[in-house]
Image (tube, coloured by chain):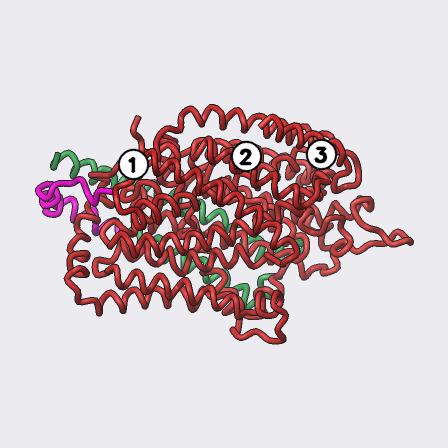
Chain colours: A red, B green
Amino acid sequence: MKKLLAILIASLSLNVHAATGQANSSAVIMFLLFIAGTMGITYWAAKKTRTASDFYTAGGGLTGFQNGLAIAGDYLSAASFLGIAGMVYVRGFDGLIYAIGFLFGWPIVMFLIAERLRNLGRYNFADVTSFRLQQKPMRVLAASASLIVITLYLIAQMVGAGKLIELLFGIKYHFAVVIVGVLMMVYVVFGGMTATTWVQIIKAVLMLFGATLMVILVLATFNFNPDAMLAEAVKVHPQGLALMAPGVSLSGNPLNAVSLGLALIFGTAGLPHILMRFFTVANAKEARRSVIYATSFIGYFYILTFIIGFGAIALLVRNPELFNTAPDGSFNILTNLIGGTNMVAVHLANAVGGSLLLGFLAAVTFATIVAVVAGLALAGAAAISHDLYSNVIAKEPVTEQQQLRLSRIATAVLGVLAILLGILFETQNVAFMVGLAFAIAASSNFPVLLMSISWRKCTTRGATIGGFIGLIVASLWVIFSSTVWVDVFGFAESITPFPNPGIISIPLAFVSIWFFSITDKSAQGKKEQEAFDALTVRSQTGLGVSSASLH
Amino acid sequence: MNKSNISAEVLKKISRHPQYKQLLKKRSLIGNCFFVFTLIVYNAFILFLGFAPEAAGKPLFVGATLSIGIFLGVLICLLAIILVVLYVTVSNRVFDPLINNIVKDVL
């Protein structure tokens, strides 16, 4: 670990020219402080991580407030912060649509699954889907969909991370990807969920603090009159007043917009790394409380992000040094921004708060990436060791210690995989990957989870076939859509009429689960339907719940 | 993982408990109302933007730059938070006492 730090310091001091083209030692110092702090946490957490329950659920003793912060931390990835701020900067209104979709996933999680999930499961959501249905097929399905979702998410995070860190700290792309991968492995392998959660909580607090400070500074420039800020933004942006209205991404095809919306709001309820967080609290009541805090923090943060996006339009233009200017000093605020439009929040920090705030935001962004990647790796490790190995592959019962060891190996493998994928996809356009991850989560994990806990007649056959149909249709649809078929593979025309599969694949998964369940006349299917009463009693009252907390 | 640690006897007792039936009924009714309301609000907003983008782009009041659409968008973000808080309040007031009574009676 010391060696790693030494390499980091050496490389950072060699590359002091950051994105803005000036030395930014405050970014490097804050970044090193963050690493030192989180290493301390990992050391402390490592001593506490003895059992599989510690590793996967931090012992299950978090409060709703802590867990709400950790969920917000997982949800507010660098992509959603920088990405949405950048989208508002370029297209104004349309940036809101994604944010609102992401946020509305939370009421859905609350009303449909949060408490029942906590009452039925122990480590991850596959515990819940296999509660009364057959272990093997349900675990294989859950692990397949989860690993695909996690891999897509990981690629998007790693590529984004590499690019960002390259810009922020002037480190080479490959090296940046390796740093993220190695740090993540250290957190997860040694500190498990305890370290991952505390890194996430600290990062969420820093991020909320940094964004709040930025918004105050931005609004202060306009005497705390948001309308004056918007008026200024409309004046300097090439799109003018059109910024205030929905643009092509919606009005072009309302069906596509609704389809995207469905994937966004139902996808959250199927994201394995988010669902896993519900097992880190003691009971359903705390799970409920987590959702209040998570929704409030996420909603608050998105509102800040809009202001940051519009504020950036109004203010960045006053700082020509942030742009690649033509010889005559002119520049286009959209195409000439140094580092591209994903960097608007970072540039704005510099414009309103100087290099200290820039350094702070850069360090927090880096922390965000590592923390989100760690959460993903943990969910992936659970799918591999808890679902696939312990419950499907192993012939004999697996001990806690074996499971723990295997989870750590799985994490290390996922870390190496993340680094390799990050390098492999460096030059690819990966913007569609988070959308695809949401679409698959909404079309496979979510229908299976919901039907298995709320519909008596659901059988293993129905859930397995329906879940795989949702998974396959959503994946194929995106591959044959304009975002991949045309933009990535370079074909002239897309095969699917619009890019987002949700409006087709989500109902299709539900209908398939229904159809293949009601036509299932097997004795096994009958037994599963009869087991629904026991499931309902436990999911409703929490009686018989296996507390993750053993202390 | 063990399937369930509740004995068949306790299970039977709970299933016959009058307040358990009440709990199931109330929870599914209230939960579904919240869910359907959320879906309608969200999709209505998206469809409004999709089919009437000009209307969404109109200023909120004369002389303002802030448009109706952006104002509604921020309101809808707040609504998501309010819905969750409201649901949890209902859960604490309505469901939890029922659950506590059931657990007290059968154990």
Residue holding disc 1: A399
Quadrant of the snapshot with the N terminus of chain A? top right
What span is in magenta? B1-29
**Left or right: B66 as drawn, with respect to A459:** right
- Letter of the chain that mark 3 sits on in the rendering: A
SS of the residue under disc 2: helix
Tell me the crowding category of disc 2: few under 14, some 14 to 19, or many 20 or more residues within 10 angstroms, Cα based.
Answer: many
Residue A154, percent from left and from top:
53, 49
Identity, as a three-letter code, of the amino acid under mark 2: Lys
Name the image quarter holding residue A266.
Answer: bottom left
Residue holding disc 2: A203
Tell me if residue A425 is in the magenta stretch. no
For marks 3 and 1, give the CA distance. Answer: 43 Å
Whether residue A238 can be seen here: yes
Observer-side mark, 2 or 1, equals 1
For marks 2 and 1, give the CA distance. Answer: 34 Å
Residue holding disc 3: A11
